[in-house]
Image (cartoon, rainbow, N blue to C red):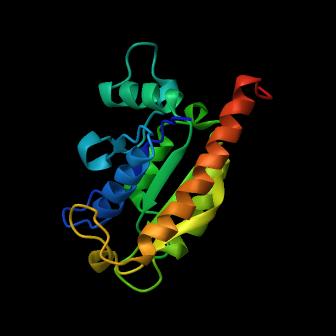
């Protein structure tokens, strides 16, 4: 079944390497027949959270928030691409996510984490997992950690290491399973 899976990138740094992972995953999702729009906080230029989307009077939310709300409501799942900043979630990612809440409900999420070093960002993935669950989009059990991202993927997101295609395939298989299961269940109603 074709899915809509926004790929939410978590970095706005000028020399960010996470865009490589986002491009890689967008391409892999699209190759499977899914819509995978990139949500890039560098392009959105959202202000630091003052008001959530739902707190704006009807029709007054900034245009980027309106577009994201429409996209998120049509989503079947979310794929979050996160760096690790000081063992935690990047501020740009937290800010991008925090503008919404109900739009995430009853949809699974998946975490691709990365770093320039050997741990692949997994220390950021643990608090991010708790955050996503609290927002109503619990993450699937698997992670896709990418250590040494600067050599694992080229600038366009093409893998330089064979293991990455296989790992990403299993990761996306799992996300599809959860997305399809929750899509079917949402069609029958939610607890509230």
Q: Nearer the viewer, residue 184 or 16?
A: 184
Place of residue 44 in the rendered image (x, y in percent of width and height, measured from the top left): 28, 40
Q: Quadrant of the C terminus?
A: top right
When asked about the image quadrant of residue 22, the answer is: bottom left
Q: Report the side of 13 relative to 82 (left or right).
A: left
Q: Nearer the viewer, residue 189 or 31?
A: 31
Q: Report the side of 154 relative to 143 (left or right).
A: left
Query: At x 64% / y 56%, what residue is drawn?
Result: 140
Q: Report the side of 37 relative to 121 (left or right).
A: left
Q: Nearer the viewer, residue 159 or 113?
A: 159
Residue 85 visible (yes or no): no
Place of residue 77 in the rendered image (x, y in percent of width and height, measured from the top left): 55, 42
Place of residue 45 in the rendered image (x, y in percent of width and height, measured from the top left): 27, 42
Q: Relative to 88, say whether 116 is above or below.
A: below
Residue at the farthest bottom position: 118
Query: At x 59% / y 47%, what residue is drawn?
Result: 176
Q: Report the side of 78 relative to 38 (left or right).
A: right
Q: Nearer the viewer, residue 85 or 138?
A: 138
Query: At x 52% / y 34%, what residue is drawn?
Result: 75
Residue 172 visible (yes or no): yes
């Amino acid at each position: 079944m074709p899915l809509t899976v926004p790929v939410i990138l978590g970095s706005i740094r000028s020399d960010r390497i996470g865009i490589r992972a986002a491009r890689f995953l967008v391409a892999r999702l699209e190759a499977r027949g899914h819509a995978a729009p990139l949500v890039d906080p560098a392009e959105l230029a959202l202000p630091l959270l003052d008001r959530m989307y739902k707190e704006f009077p009807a029709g007054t939310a900034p245009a980027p928030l309106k577009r994201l709300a429409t996209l998120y409501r049509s989503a079947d799942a979310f794929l979050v691409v996160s760096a690790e900043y000081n063992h935690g979630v990047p501020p740009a990612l937290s800010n991008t996510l925090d503008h919404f809440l109900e739009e995430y409900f009853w949809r699974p999420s998946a975490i691709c984490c990365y770093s320039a070093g050997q741990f692949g960002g997994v220390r950021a993935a643990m608090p991010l997992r708790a955050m996503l669950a609290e927002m109503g989009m619990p993450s699937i059990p698997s992670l896709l950690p990418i250590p040494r991202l600067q050599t694992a993927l080229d600038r366009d997101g093409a893998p330089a290491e064979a293991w990455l295609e296989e790992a990403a395939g299993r990761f996306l298989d799992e996300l599809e399973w959860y997305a399809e299961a929750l899509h079917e269940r949402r069609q029958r109603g939610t607890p509230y």
